[in-house]
Every structure is written in structure tokens, then in C-alpha cells.
Amino acid sequence: MAGRSFLVSEQGMKVIGLSGWSGAGKTTLLTRLIPHLIAEGLHVSTVKHAHSNFDVDIPGKDSWLHRQAGATEVLISSGRRWALMHELRGAPEPPLAELLSKMSRVDLLIVEGFKADRHPKIEIHRSANGKPLMFPQDPTIVGIAADIAVNTALPYAHLDDIPAISRIVRASAVRIEDVLAHEAAGA
């Protein structure tokens, strides 16, 4: 498997979350972290939790019209990408474990948001938000990236230190099978 990273060849797909209050810079950090991880040889995907009224489709386009007509799923494909949209139509939002099981295999799957779920997370903290750190009360926080010094025994990196955050991500990520088993056990 030349060219594949250590994660796939030795340990399979791994998962880590990025969690923090709105405005902490999770997405900004991801846009800097993903290219760094790819340059290190990893294949990376993300799962992002969004507010309930988001849309990835364009009103008036065929796929949008299919959804508006009542289709439960609409898959749109081109020579460059494909996307599957699934309308819940009043059903509850699926749990994170179910969403994770739908993802194609990569080295590292980064989950943005889903802060109430039990997978391991790196807390992203920006002091200007005026919000408290989550880690003292949240046992799923396994590392911190912040723009202030934090008194903790957890792995810590400054928000601008992408190589250090990458090291924390790689060291803290767990096998997807462990996350799925943990969720199935109801823990």
C-alpha cells in the first residue's frame, strides 16, 4: 500500500471531533488543518453538524424540484462529484453513529460540532467569545486548541500552531469501530 498513511495500513479509519462554542473558529481551523493533514499523507473527510434549516441544493434546479415533490432521497451526480441528500420528512435526526457508518473509508474523519455526543473531541476555544472552557465539565474533551494559555494536563496547542494541533489530532483520534461500538452500547 505505498502512499497510504499509517492510519489505514495499521489501524483503519479513525475519528476525532472538534468542539467548541459558536464563533470559536472550528471551521476556520479545519480549513487550515485539513491541507496540513493531507500534506502529511492522510486522506481526510469531515462530518459537520448544522442548524436545522441548512440547504445544499439550489431552488429551481432539478434535484431541488425532486425533493420538493416529496422524494426521500435525491442523489445528484456529475463527472466531478456526487451528493446524496436525504430528507427526514419529520423523522428524528439520525444519531452520529449512523451518520459515521455512511461515510466512505478514509484515514481520518473529523467531526465538527456534535458536542453532546460521546466521541473524543478537541476543544476549540477563542477567548473573545467570553464563554467558559468546556473541558472541565466534558469528559470527552481529550485536547485543547485555544488562543489563551490553559492550565490543564490535557494536550494543548495554540490555535495558530497547526503542526501541534495536527499532532494532538493524530494522537487522540480513535478507531471508528470503537466509536460505533461505544454508541451501540448506549454509553
Image (tube, rainbow, N blue to C red):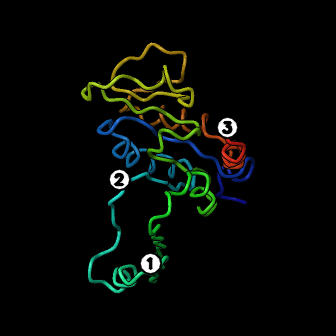
Q: In the drawing, what numbered circle is on residue 187?
A: 3
Q: Which residue lies furthest to the front in this view?
A: 90
Circle 2: element type: loop
Of all residues, the one furthest to the right in this rendering is 10
Q: Note whether 94 is above or below 140 in the view shown.
A: below
Is residue 6 visible in the rendered structure shown here?
no
Q: Which of 131 and 67 is in front in this view?
A: 67
Indicate the quadrant where residue 172 lies.
Answer: top right
Q: Residue at x 45, y 46 (%)?
A: 112
Say whether residue 92 is visible. yes
Cα distance, mark 1 to mark 3?
Answer: 40 Å
On the image, the x and y values in percent for residue 169 come to: 54, 37
Q: Which amino acid does label 2 sit on?
A: His
Tag shown at residue 80: 1
Q: Which amino acid does label 3 sit on?
A: Ala
| For residue 13, above or below residue 81 | above
Q: Which residue lies furthest to the left in this view?
A: 128
Q: Is residue 8 above or below residue 186?
A: below
Instruction: Work out which quarter of the rendered image holds the C terminus and state it.
Output: top right
Mark 3 closeness class: few <14, some 14–19, many ≥20 residues within 10 Å: few
Q: Could you tell which of marks 1 and 3 lies nearer the N-terminus?
A: 1
Cα gap from disc 1 to disc 2, whole angstroms = 27 Å
